[in-house]
Amino acid sequence: MGFGVIIIGDEILSGKRQDKHLSRVIASLQQRGLQLDWAEYVGDQPERIIATLRRSFASGDIVFSTGGIGATPDDHTRQCAAAALDLPIVLHPEAKVCIQQRILNMAAEAGQTVDLDSPDNLQRLKMGEFPQGAALIPNPYNNIPGFAIQHHYFVPGFPVMAWPMIDWVLDTHYPHLFHQQPKAEKAVLVYEAIESVLTPLMEQLEQDFPLIKIFSLPSVATATERRHIELGVKGDPQQVDAAFQVMLSGLDALQSEYVPAPLQAKD
């Protein structure tokens, strides 16, 4: 069971808004000793959303989906999730209560009376229509819930709502997965290196140390930095230590120039 994220919205693909969810989901998982396995971006096209969700439901992964759960004509995620599972979409009774309470609170703040059966307020209840059998995800920002079904968690596109909802899901449903696999990472910057020259060393390391992975991240030269490759090992802490020393010996044999890679900033 891996972790995935589906980010939905034409506004992301058109560039009208910049996605902030991917980096935040990665950070939330890393804080808990977890890792994102895949991500997909999808526009507001029901056929594509349904196809994407069918694949992700079949994967058995834990998946977060952001965006498209409102009640306007360009919001399709709720209906598409139901279609992907061949389930009817129904008004969740607890969601109805949450939405109506939000309507009453907003009216009270404005000093107004409210008719819960008015056309606009009945339209707002669409936000509580989910695939049959879905559970709620509480929204601490405005009390309009998201929904969960088959290890998929659907939250709004607004970061101020989505991020605490995603954290709640992780802390409520998956604490047993936190920090289960100790991991370590060590790397160096190898200057003026050529990946094809380093490849035999990388392949040998992965063969000799099956619990680690090698990564190679090339960077072009800039006005302030020379061309280099960030070369490193990650995985099981004991094998990382041993593999890193073998890697340094291999770089020395190639007469490579290298320095320790800067540590990544922690959130």
Image (cartoon, rainbow, N blue to C red):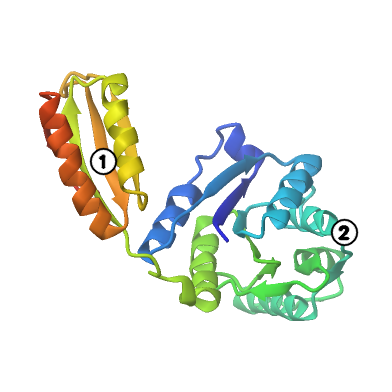
Cβ atoms under marks 1 and 2 closer than 8 Å: no
Q: Residues within 10 Å of mark 1 (few under 14, many from 20)?
A: many
Residue 257 can be seen in this image? no
Residue 139 can be seen in this image? yes
Does residue 253 appear to the left or right of 72 in the view shown? left
Does residue 16 appear to the left or right of 77 in the view shown? left
The residue type indicated by label 1 comes to: Gly
Q: Which mark is residue 232?
A: 1
Note whether 245 is above or below 258 in the view shown.
below
Mark 1–mark 2 distance (CA, rounded to whole Å): 46 Å
Q: Which of the pair 22/86 is nearer the observer?
A: 86
- Residue furthest front as drawn: 208
Q: Secondary structure at mark 1?
A: strand
Does residue 188 appear to the left or right of 133 in the view shown? left
Does residue 242 appear to the left or right of 91 in the view shown? left
Q: Which of the pair 202/37 is nearer the observer?
A: 202
Note whether 164 is above or below 69 in the view shown.
below
Q: Secondary structure at mark 2?
A: loop
Q: Report which quarter residue 134 is drawn in.
A: bottom right
Q: Looking at the figure, which quarter contains the C terminus?
A: bottom left
Residue at 68% across, 52% down:
56
Q: Which of the pair 211/83 is nearer the observer?
A: 211
Residue at 79% across, 75% down:
92
Q: Would you name the residue on which mark 2 appears? A: 86
Q: Report which quarter residue 102 is drawn in.
A: bottom right
Q: Which of the pair 94/171 is nearer the observer?
A: 171
Note whether 52 is above or below 79 in the view shown.
above
> Looking at the picture, how far across and down is residue 173, in whole percent?
55, 76
